[in-house]
Amino acid sequence: QSVLTQPPSASGTPGQGVTISCSGSGSNIGTNTVNWYQQLPGTAPKLLIYSNNKRPSGVPDRFFGSKSGTSASLAISGLQSEDEADYYCAAWDDSLNGGVFGGGTKLTVL
Amino acid sequence: EVQVVQSGAEVKKPGESLKISCKGSGYDFTTYWIGWVRQMPGKGLEWMGIIYPGDSDTRYSPSFQGQVTISADKSSSTAYLQWSSLKASDTAMYYCARGVSGLLLLQNGAFDVWGQGTMVTLSS
């Protein structure tokens, strides 16, 4: 059971938008920033969003991160087939004195 | 170019020891945290631990404390993950990744550069 809770799956059609949620607690998301990672099939994870809502260079602005209280969300607009991947949220947990990941959400582009 | 490059795949037997590596280049290795992440077959990412090569300050997830040892060699810009006695359940892909600069708050850092992964397979 992951410390951060994500839906196991999400889906959308090309051009549509989709939102993936990440629920935590006061010792992680409630206190620290949230990062999101994208893992394409058979590849290493890639940083997608850091510090709740910042995009590294090269990440399209179709990807948008937000945080409110003890929850965070990743919104993807204008879905493309290449967005089909697993998405993970992550944060530091002060109680564990370490990082934690969500269980991951498998995004399918129909 | 900033990169971290991991050692190759390993096939080991239960009870054997193992040390895998992660070499950083293109940046000052001693001033960024380096973390390790496990991904068991078909499963999600698990945060194992992190080390600051500058002073070897190391933090472990409670799930991995005592099960593995994380270390770093500043002279070769290399971080290590090691086991003294492998178990069948250690079969997984292990990733290293560069964390936040030591000048910033560890709690608000992210893994911005990832290695290619090291597959560890246990087979009796």
Image (tube, coloured by chain):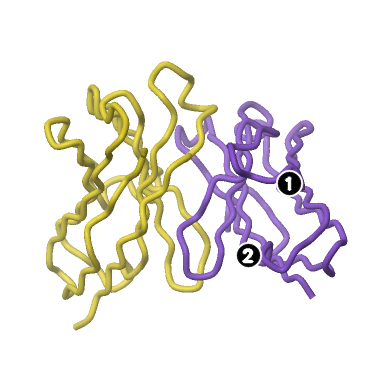
Chain colours: A purple, B yellow
Using the image, tell me which numbered label, if any, was put on residue A85.
2
**Chain designation of label 1:** A
Q: Are marks 1 and 2 on the same chain?
A: yes
- Amino acid bearing label 1: Phe
Out of B123 and A38, give the one closest to the viewer: A38
Residue B31, percent from left and from top: 31, 23
Look at 58% across and 49% down and name the residue there.
A37
Q: Position of residue A32 (x, y in %)?
A: 61, 28
Q: Pick the quarter of the image with the C terminus of chain A.
A: bottom right
Q: Residue A108, relative to residue A25: is it above or below?
A: below
Quarter of the image with the N terminus of chain A is bottom right
Residue position for label 1: A63
User: How dense is the environment of label 2, judged by Cα within 10 Å: few (below 14), some, or many (20 and up)?
Assistant: many
Image: B100 above or below B34: above
Tag 2, which chain? Answer: A
Q: SS class of the residue under badge 1?
A: strand
